[in-house]
Amino acid sequence: MDKDCLFCKIIAGEIPSGKVYEDDAVYAFKDINPIAPVHYLFVPKTHICCAKKITAENSDVVGKIFEAIAKVAESENINSYRVINNCGEEAGQSVMHLHFHLVAGKKMGWGEQSLG
Ligand code: 5GP
Ligand code: ZN
């Protein structure tokens, strides 16, 4: 846990969140500022700052996150969805704890303004 990290505090229960899924390695919760009818964030319980820091030692959790996404989507009958990872400031990463957005419930285009 990184004591200055917002998502570490959410995982630890120090900051409330709308939990949608949890297992030994993964935590998922509703985005506070949703861009679509369904907008969840899937995070590893261990602190990894961003996709740049995924290595052979810690990459198992990325597979577990995608397993968790598939489980949640199936249980909520979400047939079509988009998974997004923003890595770095220019790409729009605002919280420096690796996270994958699950976005669904609206027609999505493709390209720079695809989710606008
Ligand atoms: P990023 O921009 O880093 O890819 O995504 C960070 C996401 O975290 C944003 O979509 C933002 O709305 C969400 N977020 C920021 N602070 C909080 C919070 O305190 N609680 C929740 N549930 N989501 C948050
Ligand atoms: Zn963290």
Image (tube, grey):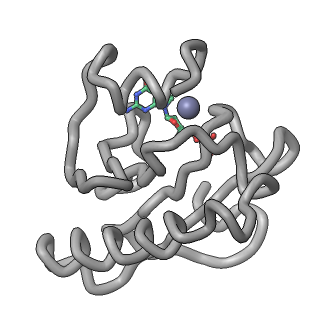
**How many discs appear?**
0
Q: Position of residue 26 (x, y in %)?
A: 36, 54
Residue at position x 33%, y 48% from top?
27
Classify 109 as above or below 10: below
Residue at position x 30%, y 44% from top?
29
Q: Would residue 27 appear left or right of 113 to someone viewing this image?
A: left
Q: Position of residue 105 (x, y in %)?
A: 31, 68
Q: Quadrant of the C terminus?
A: bottom right
Classify 3 as above or below 101: above
| Closer to us: 112 or 96 | 96
Q: Position of residue 74 (x, y in %)?
A: 18, 80
Residue at position x 43%, y 44% from top?
45
- The quadrant holding residue 77 is bottom left
- Pick out the residue farthest to the bottom: 79
- Pick out the residue farthest to the front: 57
Ligand 2's image quarter is top right
Q: Position of residue 96 (x, y in %)?
A: 67, 34
Residue at position x 42%, y 21% from top?
9
- The quadrant holding residue 51 is bottom right
- Pick out the residue farthest to the right: 90
Classify 60 as above or below 99: below
Q: Would residue 40 appear left or right of 71 to someone viewing this image?
A: right
| Closer to us: 69 or 52 | 52
Classify 80 as above or below 76: below
- The quadrant holding residue 107 is bottom left
| Closer to us: 72 or 106 | 72
Q: Would residue 105 appear left or right of 35 to someone viewing this image?
A: left
